[in-house]
């Protein structure tokens, strides 16, 4: 098991939330991740389900063993998944073709920690086509598509990830990505901040030489701002999460569809007439509420922000305190990015059969640790679905052990991920090629012009035709005819 240099380092790192978690009491993660109810339609060779990838000696057809995946023999199936994803990621493919000759990422050594799916693979292969060298690991122990990881490893990408990692596996994979002889990262692409903080704490000399960090989640961005506020962020970082193309499309439109997919696949629930509380009415919460309301669920929300609360009221949702309604709820969904949003006391008060799940990035929103107590029984009923049984027989249905529902229990729309992936690619290009002095040791938002460019790349999918300003109109509005068309303070 990976050890910290001293107790202080371990205590410091433990302050931050992680997606890695402990094994289920009733069944091991490796077993649950290979059930017939596979959440991401992953092809699985059941003959080696019980063997940890760390204990296998695997080599790809090029003779390389610089990877650790579930089964390299799944590569052919993974390649098919990647090819399917490419069909709905035309903007990223277009960017690949436009910039391939220039190789804007030549010399970039990118270490990445994201969900490893077919869509992410398209991004990774785009970065490589643009000149980058990449090493990759997973930011979530349940979301990796094993066959896709195998396909990447087969092409020579050092990938260290598999569905159903243990906590020790999770950190081992991150360390293998970073700590390799003869290769040192100069760019970081992160989703949640675990990779960034691992490099910061374990490899400070590497961290200081990084030219830029790109972070796409609320949790990871929060952790970057914490570092910046403490004066410990010694490299520029790009906050992709708050870019318009990420927040409005990935957070809102993606979650509007994937919340239903995740709940249906795991529970077969009928939404009509169900009492649902959504904790948090940011972009993710708005997407969830819209979808659930459309299918006839009776939805209320919780909020700490009066502006978001007022938006919820105007959208027709009752704003409540969780403790006031917890006994009546059929479904509880968290999407705040905070910790202990659903406490043990509230879990104790839930009615029999209540479904509890998380749509926020981190696994800290539901107090799952408090449920691992002697008086409660865990019963795994299908992949990513646990019944927590109280002494009186009451059952609460916990999904993905409190981790991200849509990527742990289902899939997300490829087109939306194309928008996010294109944004990430452009952010990496911008930071890597920025002249010295443009970005200081701080956290930055994606330039507005770049946001608009990402959107424009996706419009041809809808045969959309933009209206062009006349010279007179542009002068009247004080705009450049080619954009940007909105000031940075504009709220879309």
Image (cartoon, rainbow, N blue to C red):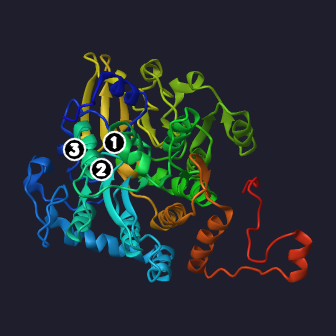
Residue 188, position as x, y percentages in the image: 42, 53
Q: CA distance from mark 2 to mark 1?
A: 9 Å
Given residues 222 and 344, the one toward you in this image is: 222
Give SS at disc 1: loop
Mark in the foreground, 2 or 1: 1
Task: Tell me what residue is drawn at x 62 percent, y 44 percent.
Answer: 282
Query: Considering depth in this image, is 213 or 297 the residue closer to the camera?
Result: 213
Q: Residues within 10 Å of mark 1 (few under 14, many from 20)?
A: some
Q: Is residue 348 toward the left or the right of residue 376 in the image? A: right
Q: How far apart are the alpha carbons under marks 3 and 1? A: 34 Å
Going from N to C along the chain, the mark reached first, 3 or 1, is 3
Asked if residue 394 can be seen in this view, the reply is: no
In the displayed structure, 389 sits above or below 282; it is above
User: Which residue in the protein does label 2 denote?
Assistant: 178
Q: Which residue lies at the image location 30% right of the left edge and 45% below the top edge? A: 141
* Depth check, front residue: 250 or 113: 113
Disc 2, disc 3: CB below 8 Å?
no
Q: Are marks 3 and 1 in contact (CB under 8 Å)?
A: no
Looking at the image, can residue 102 be seen?
A: yes
Give the residue number, with chain letter if any, for mark 1: 203
Tag 2 near tag 1, CB within 8 Å: yes
**Residue 319: quarter of image:** top right
* Up/down of 157 relative to 10, above or below: below
Q: Residues within 10 Å of mark 3 (few under 14, many from 20)?
A: many
Q: Which residue matches tag 3? A: 32
Q: Earlier in the sequence, mark 2 or mark 1?
A: 2
Q: Position of residue 93 (x, y in %)?
A: 45, 77
Mark sitting earlier along the chain (2/3) = 3
């Amino acid at each position: 098991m990976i050890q910290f240099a001293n107790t202080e380092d371990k205590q410091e790192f433990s302050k931050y939330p992680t997606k890695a978690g402990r094994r289920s009491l009733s069944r091991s993660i490796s077993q649950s991740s290979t059930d017939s109810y596979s959440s991401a339609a992953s092809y699985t060779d059941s003959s080696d389900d019980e063997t940890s990838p760390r204990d296998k000696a695997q080599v790809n057809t090029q003779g390389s063993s610089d990877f650790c995946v579930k089964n390299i023999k799944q590569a052919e199936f993974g390649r098919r998944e990647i090819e399917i994803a490419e069909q709905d990621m035309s903007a990223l493919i277009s960017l690949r073709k436009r910039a391939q000759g220039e190789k804007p990422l030549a010399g970039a050594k990118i270490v990445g920690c994201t969900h490893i799916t077919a869509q992410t693979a398209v991004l990774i292969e785009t970065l490589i086509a643009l000149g980058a060298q990449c090493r990759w690991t997973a930011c979530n122990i349940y979301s990796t598509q094993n066959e896709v990881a195998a396909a990447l490893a087969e092409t020579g990408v050092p990938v260290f990830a598999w569905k159903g990692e243990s906590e020790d596996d999770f950190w081992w994979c991150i360390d293998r990505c970073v700590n390799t002889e003869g290769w040192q990262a100069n760019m970081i692409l992160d989703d949640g901040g675990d990779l960034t903080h691992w490099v910061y704490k374990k490899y400070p000399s590497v961290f200081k030489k990084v030219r830029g960090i790109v972070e796409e989640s609320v949790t990871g961005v929060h952790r970057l701002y914490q570092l910046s506020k403490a004066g410990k962020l010694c490299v520029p970082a790009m906050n992709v999460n708050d870019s318009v193309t990420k927040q409005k499309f990935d957070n809102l439109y993606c979650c509007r569809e994937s919340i239903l997919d995740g709940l249906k696949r795991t529970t077969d629930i009928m939404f009509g007439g169900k009492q649902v509380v959504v904790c948090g009415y940011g972009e993710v919460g708005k997407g969830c509420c819209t979808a659930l309301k459309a299918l006839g669920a009776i939805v209320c929300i919780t909020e700490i922000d009066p502006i978001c609360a007022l938006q919820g009221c105007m959208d027709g949702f009752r704003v409540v305190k969780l403790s006031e309604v917890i006994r009546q709820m059929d479904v509880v969904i968290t999407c705040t990015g905070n910790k202990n949003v659903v406490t043990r006391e509230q879990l104790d008060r839930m009615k029999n059969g209540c479904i509890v799940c998380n749509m926020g990035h981190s696994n800290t929103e539901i107090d799952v640790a408090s449920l691992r107590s002697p008086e409660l029984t865990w019963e795994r009923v299908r992949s990513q679905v646990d019944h927590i049984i109280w002494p009186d027989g009451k059952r609460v249905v916990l999904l993905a052990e409190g981790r991200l529902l849509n990527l742990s229990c289902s899939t997300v729309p490829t087109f939306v991920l194309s928008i996010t992936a294109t944004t990430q690619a452009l952010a990496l290009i911008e930071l890597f090629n920025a002249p010295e002095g443009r970005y200081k040791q701080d956290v930055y938002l994606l330039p507005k012009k770049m946001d608009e460019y990402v959107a424009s790349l996706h419009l041809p999918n809808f045969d959309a035709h933009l209206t062009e300003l006349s010279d007179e109109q542009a002068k009247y509005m004080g705009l450049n005819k080619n954009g940007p068309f909105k000031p940075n303070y504009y709220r879309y």
